[in-house]
């Protein structure tokens, strides 16, 4: 590469980082500035080490990252995901053909692709915390390299057939792990790419989003084998082209059939009001006196609630510092209870920030327990992100504790190993202790009807939300505060993912967001009455209630489990091959041509 171009790129990236940093230091809300800053950081890394990259391979890698980005909500180009991995497969084939190039060489190109994909898709996370946002983007890209490198290694050791078979196996096993471990950030699970195209994926009620991931990966592999596996140029393999067409279009046909033939009827309807109070969380939500916020909630509620209303929904952490031990004595709870009593049918579901104080002789042994010293007295307590239900016809107040926590702000993953990072997490707005959770989902029961109190981040986990449905939930209430991300694609993507939960579980969804967007979603994934971001609103609609269990609701992420089992089998095969293969490097004769890949082990 021309040295002047390289140095010019470094200067542009440094100038962009300096400009964005200075603007972000001066502004309370950052908007799109983190996008340019984090992209410039990646650009600085690439320009600094550009001499060690081949421009053709780097271009292929970055084009793959761009295609996968353009296929993700909110850009309506989902079909591009069917080819997003093809450039990566091309440079993997070319790299594999060159003797002396190691897995380290493959890693740096794959990392560039996945880092670009993560940054362009989820840069907005940095609006809540710049260190957390950068860590999420760059660390997640590192995780994504693992299944891709494992695919490359399997292809080298067991042959092309096993290699291409292993790519969806490893990738889906990775996504399954990402749904279930402490460092959980499954936002850009491949199957989420169709969140704004629900009519394409009605079959998610059988597979969940991991079925969508499998669809995308099979489409990429068959398209590559049909058009790009010959190193001499594009030569169409008709058999693989037919397979690619079947892979792409058969699920679309199934989705159309399912949509046209569905005859399931709701067991009942509930009239629901969702309130959007519009408190900006960075500088307003936690500074405005709670009494003033309460009046805003009640004023908006009174505009829509009447004697026919069954449910009223408020967003996540609508009210703060609610003590479980004497919840009935809290002035805010008493005022809400008084409001609800005016409407005999009404049930109010709201998110709260809460805590419990423990007797010193009955303190649970878990890391989320905190202490407060006052003189010689020690108080043991635990914080929660909770949801409660206040009913006109009931004296008790059931409480649900948010149990899928955001790594960083709400939980320090594997705190026993990483406890030394407490100062870093304090600056990120999180704590080492984290917040308390509950082991199983629970629902808010109202006679024969039950609703799922889903809090914010929990709504991106399909099988987790399925736990509410298996407990009897007839509808899903999502309470969230997406204003942390400002007016960016973040809150829009979050809304779209609720559409996938509706399809997977065949449940209507009511969404109450602090700053937007609040809406209703039917069981087919159609969005109704979506509110604008940054406005106060109260919406009313009739929500269909269902009691059937979809295949996915019954069996959860079984595709991820099967992929994990197959990953173990492939690992065993690699281990056997390792002990059977004589030591010493495999070489390719000098000047030999790269062969066409033969799909046999």
Image (spheres, grey):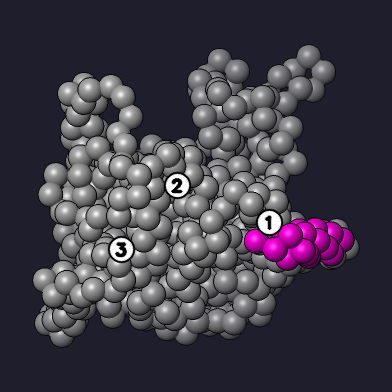
> Tag 1's secondary structure?
helix
Q: Which residue is mark 2?
A: 106
Q: Position of residue 44 (x, y in %)?
A: 71, 55
Q: Which residue is mark 1?
A: 47
Query: On screen, 169 above or below 271?
Result: above
In three-dimensional space, the C-alpha distance between marks 2 and 3, rounded to whole angstroms, equals 18 Å
In three-dimensional space, the C-alpha distance between marks 1 and 2, rounded to whole angstroms, equals 18 Å
Question: Quarter of the image holding residue 39?
Answer: bottom right
Q: Residue at x 30, y 50 (%)?
A: 592
Q: Position of residue 201 (x, y in %)?
A: 26, 73
Q: Is residue 410 left or right of residue 60?
A: right
**Lower sequence index among marks 1 and 3:** 1
Screen quadrant of the N terminus: bottom right
> Tag 2's secondary structure?
helix
Screen quadrant of the C terminus: top left
In three-dimensional space, the C-alpha distance between marks 1 and 3, rounded to whole angstroms, equals 28 Å
The front one of 543 and 436 is: 436
Question: Quarter of the image holding residue 170?
Answer: top left
- The residues colored magenta run 1-22
The local crowd at label 1, few if under 14, some if 14 to 19, many if 20 or more residues have their Cα within 10 Å, is many
**Lower sequence index among marks 1 and 2:** 1
The local crowd at label 2, few if under 14, some if 14 to 19, many if 20 or more residues have their Cα within 10 Å, is many
Q: Position of residue 339 (x, y in %)?
A: 57, 67
In this rendering, does residue 190 appear at all?
no
Q: Which residue is mark 3?
A: 231
Q: Residue at x 38, y 37 (%)?
A: 439
Q: Closer to the camera: disc 1 or disc 3?
A: 3
**Lower sequence index among marks 2 and 3:** 2
- Residue 271 falls inside the magenta stretch: no
Q: Magenta stretch: dominant SS?
A: helix
């Amino acid at each position: 590469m021309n040295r002047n171009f390289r140095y010019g790129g470094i200067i542009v990236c440094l100038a962009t980082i300096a400009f964005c940093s200075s603007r972000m230091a001066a502004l309370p809300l950052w908007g799109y500035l983190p996008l340019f800053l984090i992209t410039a950081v990646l650009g600085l890394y690439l320009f600094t080490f550009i001499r060690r990259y081949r421009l053709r391979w780097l271009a292929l890698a970055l084009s793959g990252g761009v295609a996968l980005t353009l296929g993700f909500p909110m850009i309506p180009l989902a079909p591009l995901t069917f080819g997003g991995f093809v450039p990566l497969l091309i440079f993997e084939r070319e790299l594999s053909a060159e003797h002396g190039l190691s897995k380290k060489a493959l890693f740096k190109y794959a990392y560039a692709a996945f880092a670009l994909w993560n940054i362009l898709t989820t840069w907005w996370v940095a609006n809540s915390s710049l260190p957390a946002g950068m860590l999420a983007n760059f660390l997640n890209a590192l995780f994504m390299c693992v299944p891709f490198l494992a695919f490359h290694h399997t292809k080298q050791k067991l042959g092309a057939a096993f290699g291409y078979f292993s790519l969806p196996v490893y990738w889906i096993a990775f996504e399954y792990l990402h749904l279930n471990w402490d460092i959980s950030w499954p936002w850009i699970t491949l199957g989420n790419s169709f969140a704004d195209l629900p009519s394409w994926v009605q079959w998610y009620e059988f597979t969940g989003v991991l079925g969508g991931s499998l669809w995308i990966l099979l489409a990429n592999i068959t398209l590559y084998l049909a058009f790009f596996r010959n190193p001499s140029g594009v030569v169409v393999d008709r058999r693989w082209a037919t397979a690619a067409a079947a892979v792409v279009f058969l699920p679309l046909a199934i989705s159309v059939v399912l949509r046209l033939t569905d005859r399931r009827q709701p067991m009942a309807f509930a009239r629901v009001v969702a309130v959007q109070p519009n408190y900006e969380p960075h500088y307003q939500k936690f500074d405005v006196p709670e009494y003033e916020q309460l009046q805003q909630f009640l004023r908006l509620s009174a505009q829509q609630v009447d004697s026919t209303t069954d449910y009223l929904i408020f967003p996540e952490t609508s009210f703060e510092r609610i003590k479980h031990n004497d919840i009935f004595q809290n002035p805010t709870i008493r005022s809400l209870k008084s409001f609800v009593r005016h409407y005999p049918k009404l049930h109010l579901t709201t998110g709260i920030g809460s805590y419990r104080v423990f007797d010193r002789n009955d303190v649970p042994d878990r890391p989320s327990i905190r202490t407060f010293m006052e003189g010689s007295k020690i108080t043991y307590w635990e914080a929660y992100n909770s949801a409660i239900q206040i009913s006109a016809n009931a004296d008790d107040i059931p409480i649900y504790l948010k149990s899928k926590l955001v790594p960083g702000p709400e939980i320090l993953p594997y705190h026993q190993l990483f406890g030394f990072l407490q100062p870093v997490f304090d600056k990120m707005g999180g704590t080492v202790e984290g917040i308390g959770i509950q082991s199983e989902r629970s629902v808010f029961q109202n006679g024969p009807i039950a609703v799922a109190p889903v809090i914010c981040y929990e709504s991106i986990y399909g099988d987790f939300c399925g736990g509410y449905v298996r407990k009897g939930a007839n509808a899903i209430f999502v309470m969230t505060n997406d204003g942390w991300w400002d007016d960016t694609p973040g809150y829009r993507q979050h809304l779209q993912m609720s559409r996938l939960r509706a399809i997977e579980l065949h449940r209507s969804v009511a969404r109450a967001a602090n700053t937007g967007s609040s809406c209703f979603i039917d069981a087919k994934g159609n969005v109704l009455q979506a509110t604008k971001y940054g406005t106060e609103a109260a919406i009313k609609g009739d929500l269909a209630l269902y009691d059937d269990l979809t295949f996915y609701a019954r069996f959860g992420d079984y595709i991820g489990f099967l992929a994990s089992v197959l990953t173990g089998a492939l690992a065993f095969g690699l281990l056997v091959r390792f002990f059977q293969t004589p030591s010493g490097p495999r070489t390719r004769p000098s000047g030999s041509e790269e062969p066409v890949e033969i799909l046999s082990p």
